[in-house]
Image (tube, grey):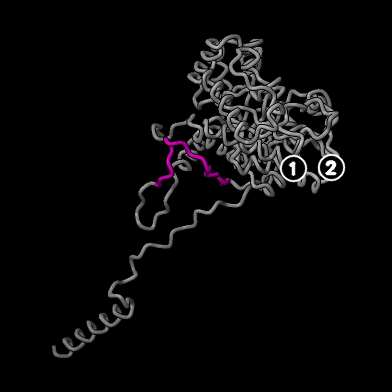
């Protein structure tokens, strides 16, 4: 019995000594929480074989209803940004076809089959069920009166499961659908204001935004970041903010700030710069005969300034830069991923210029354009010439493995995140 007592006492002493050695502050580390995992963004997808978990951007601008707070977590659990969580939940809930449709902005006519659509009724409702596209773009032929276009836009939103980008080209001057059809504002061509400074560029963006919001628009394909550096160029001309690259950079950035303050999604166009071309890409192939270094010193300056100011989108031009790529910028992985994404650091939505323009539609079929553009890094295809062919081509490319579904998710995540950031999707009142 004595021997057993001695052994028991020795065992207790050894146990106490072990515990004391494990914790110099009197507490054990057995239940300490593991280090919090890094919230750094994963590497950007690099081409058709993109990772299945794409990076999701946390935007610099978040409207009041979104907030920057993180949800309460248990010790040792990683905090999750509610915007990121909702983006992931929405994307995960979508079929492949729904994701691909979300990457399209179309004229209503393209899915309704009705020429010069001006009313959203049962035909539009059925069309949006079949083609749950990311947005509509309106041209002058779709706009008859203020009451008509307001009702068209609000009804279209009611029919869409995920709220639509309702877009228009409202630059001021000769490219201004609401001004020409409704007299919605008095903003003239941007070159008119080139000597009035950045405050005027900002104020003009506010004026344009107010007109857009009045009629139910939320997206403007402006400002023009091209510089009218070639007097022979007719497609840009007085649509540019200046004939000088540095001046244009400051004015474009001010305009971006104006659109963002108004809650209107804006788009820099036409990357990498259309102001020095002799040709008009609406009608034929257009060329920029400059090296990459020359573009960095000139054409890219307004795009860099606009990106730094927080531009939501960048629109690619159907412009060929032979020194960089034989394909138009819209289809060029070098220009979109290597330069726009990686070098200039743009993390927002990349959208093509209209794909019914002759510079691209006469050279390539709709399927090739869609697959090549998305492979190059594009997120949204604007007015594809054939919607069904575009959807089928992208679906088939995913099934073949030419484009991973992760690559599609990457673009759809950017699109959903932008819709949250401008208040189209209210995550605080959304149940999943």
Q: Would you say 65 lies left or right of 234 here?
A: left
* Nearer-N-terminus badge (2/1): 2
Q: Main secondary structure of the magenta part?
A: loop
- The x and y percentages for residue 104 are 63, 28
Which picture quadrant has residue 318? top right
User: Please, is residue 133 above or below residue 35 in the view?
Assistant: above
Q: Give the spatial CA distance, label 2 vs label 1.
A: 13 Å
Q: Identify the magenta region.
A: 53-70
Front residue (pair 198, 221): 198
- Which numbered circle lies on residue 396? none
- The x and y percentages for residue 200 are 61, 31
* Residue 21 seen anywhere in this rendered image of the structure: yes
- The x and y percentages for residue 382 are 67, 27
110 within the magenta span: no
- Quadrant where the C terminus lies? top left
Residue at image point 57% right, 52% down? 42
- Quadrant where the N terminus lies? bottom left
Name the residue carrying label 2: 290
Which picture quadrant has residue 4? bottom left
Q: Secondary structure at mark 1?
A: helix
Most extreme residue toward the front is 196
Residue at image point 48% right, 43% down? 84
User: Please, is residue 202 above or below residue 78 in the view?
Assistant: above
Q: Secondary structure at mark 2?
A: loop
Front residue (pair 9, 33): 33
Front residue (pair 156, 267): 267
């Amino acid at each position: 019995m004595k021997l057993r007592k001695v052994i028991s006492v020795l065992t207790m002493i050894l146990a106490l000594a072990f515990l004391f050695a494990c914790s110099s502050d009197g507490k054990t580390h057995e239940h300490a929480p593991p280090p919090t995992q890094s919230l750094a963004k994963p590497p950007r997808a690099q081409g058709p074989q993109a990772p299945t978990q794409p990076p999701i951007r946390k935007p610099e601008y978040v409207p009041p209803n979104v907030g920057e707070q993180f949800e309460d977590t248990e010790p040792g659990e990683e905090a999750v940004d509610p915007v990121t969580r909702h983006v992931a939940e929405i994307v995960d809930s979508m079929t492949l076809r729904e994701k691909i449709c979300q990457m399209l902005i179309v004229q209503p006519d393209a899915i309704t089959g009705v020429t010069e659509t001006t009313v959203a009724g049962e035909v539009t409702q059925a069309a949006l069920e079949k083609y749950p596209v990311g947005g509509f773009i309106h041209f002058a032929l779709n706009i008859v009166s203020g009451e008509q276009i307001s009702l068209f836009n609000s009804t279209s939103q009611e029919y869409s499961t995920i709220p639509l980008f309702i877009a228009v080209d409202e630059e001021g001057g000769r490219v201004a659908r609401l001004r020409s059809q409704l007299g919605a504002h008095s903003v003239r061509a941007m070159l008119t204001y080139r000597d009035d400074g950045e405050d005027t560029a900002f104020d003009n963006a506010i004026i344009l935004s107010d007109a857009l919001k009045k009629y139910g628009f939320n997206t403007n394909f402006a400002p023009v970041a091209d510089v009218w550096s070639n007097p022979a160029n007719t497609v840009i001309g007085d649509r540019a903010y200046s004939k000088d690259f540095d001046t244009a950079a400051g004015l474009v950035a001010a305009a971006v700030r104006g659109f963002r303050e108004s809650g209107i999604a804006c788009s820099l166009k036409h990357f990498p710069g259309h102001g020095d071309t002799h040709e008009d890409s609406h009608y034929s192939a257009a060329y920029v005969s400059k090296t990459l270094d020359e573009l960095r010193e000139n054409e890219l300056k307004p795009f860099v300034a606009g990106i730094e100011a927080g531009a939501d989108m960048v629109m690619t031009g159907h412009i060929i830069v032979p020194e960089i790529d034989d394909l138009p910028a819209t289809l060029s992985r070098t220009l979109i991923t290597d330069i726009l994404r990686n070098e200039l650091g743009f993390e927002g939505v990349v959208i093509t210029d209209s794909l019914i323009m002759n510079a691209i539609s006469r050279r390539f079929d709709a399927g090739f354009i869609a697959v090549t553009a998305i492979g190059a890094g594009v997120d949204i295809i604007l007015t594809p010439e054939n919607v069904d062919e575009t959807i089928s081509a992208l679906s088939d490319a995913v099934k073949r493995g030419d484009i991973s579904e992760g690559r599609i998710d990457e673009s759809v995540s950017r699109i959903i995140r932008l819709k949250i950031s401008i208040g189209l999707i209210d995550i605080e009142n959304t149940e999943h």
